[in-house]
Amino acid sequence: MAKIYYARVDEFWRKEEKYAYLDEKQHRGNIEWQEIQPDAKHNWLTEGMHEEFENFLPIGSKESKASRREIVKSLFKVYSRGVCSNNDAYVYNFDADAEKQTAEKMVENYNLQLDRWNRMGQPDEIEEFLEVDEHVLKWIRNTKRSLLRGKEAEFDSAKVRQVLYRPFCKQFYYYDRVFSEDIYQLPGLFPLDAGGDNLAIWLSDKGLRSPFSTLASGLLADLHLCASSDLFQCFPFYTYNEDGTNRRENITDWALEQFQSHYKDKSITKWDVFHYVYALLHHPFYRERYAANLKRELPRIPLAPDFRAVAEIGKRLAEIHVKYEQQPEYPLERIEAPDKPLDWRVEKMKLSKDKRSLIYNDFLTLSGIPPEVFEYRLGNRSALEWIIDQYQVSTDKRSGITNDPNRPDDPQYIVRLIGQVITVSLETGKLVTSLFNLPLLTNID
């Protein structure tokens, strides 16, 4: 029988340190190897994983998602990855009208090429056939596949939908299958027709490389919501038919029974379960203890001793994260340059070296940022750093399309948003601390 041996160096070593280590060892015989065995799930590298994780309630599973049975043994029946566009410059924009113009040109160019393809006898060699104008349309894999299927595109301004592109950063997205690489099961969660409200927990997919993250939103979101290196899954409260009809609760009856039975409380609702799950995913002990497990599979949810306390915290977390634009502004000091005219326009913001001030533009500096703000992190950035990173004017080199976050109809929006996100960050920190003071599990080492 074959045997597998394993050796590792410090995961934070730089490339030069790894090369130096190999130079020193010279030969594999000089390395101390460890024989390893797989666990029941065929994981070979199990360091840091905890067996009790398997006894928790699965948040979702491929088996449950595919099952047509009424009894589904997971908390959520359906879940989906976020929007995979591979086409961001063309299908996302801060300005709805700008996105409509881009989308209309994409549709027109695509249909012209589809017509030419049909007139030329539908040649198989698509790469040689295409007349590429990257100022108008990027021919991603799915766009090519749609042409080969003879699928005609139809422009519809209603498909320009507001989405959560990055944490606390809304943009407009052209919601059409032809011009994104994949939209998975999202039309059944956020229908293609504009109708249908929803609330979803977005969280890091297995295989994550950045720290585990989760964020609630009432909007459709991008595949890389909180980390460009990771994928994000959506667990919604409702599901729909693609036309927005037949709304159904997505938390299973089996899940509700598990909670009601364990806590001996028939008053627990599916919304309570939703909020409990959201809070639990923020619990510092949970994230730290099960960090290795979360890299291998989707979260599993333990039953904490105090359900109500956890659910109430989750309800408040969801409220401030979803309605972040309705939160009060943190009172930052506004320092205005006396020799510059009044100006609310952003080009590119940056933090001071001590991170206590934010240089908004040549006219305005925002000072008095509390250090605690940077403790609320989504992926490798704090919430405030996401705002600084995303709210800047950028021009895509391939297409020449400019994406400008400034709002002529609301010139102080970004200044206001900064104060609101600071408020959200500080309250999130307090709520997470209160979670830490609640026991998560009993009878573990």
Image (tube, grey):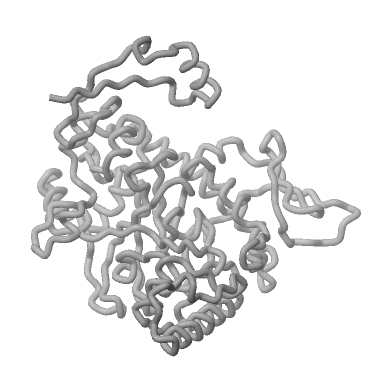
Q: Is residue 248 above or below residue 233?
A: below
Location of residue 226 in the rendering, given as x and y in whole percent from the top left corner: 46, 49
Location of residue 314 in the rendering, given as x and y in whole percent from the top left corner: 35, 49
Location of residue 414 in the rendering, given as x and y in whole percent from the top left corner: 64, 59
Q: Residue at x 48, y 86 (%)?
A: 116
Q: Is residue 371 above or below residue 12?
A: below
Residue sitting farthest toward the right: 339
Q: Residue at x 17, y 37 (%)?
A: 41
Q: Is residue 246 above or below residue 180?
A: below
Total marks placed: 0
One can see residue 292 in this view: yes
Q: Residue at x 16, y 53 (%)?
A: 255
Q: Is residue 396 above or below residue 58?
A: below
Location of residue 330 in the rendering, given as x and y in whole percent from the top left corner: 61, 49
The answer to whether residue 7 is left or right of residue 20 is left
One can see residue 99 in this view: no
**Quadrant in which the C terminus appears:** top left
Residue sitting farthest toward the bottom: 119
Nearest the viewer among 124 and 394 is 124
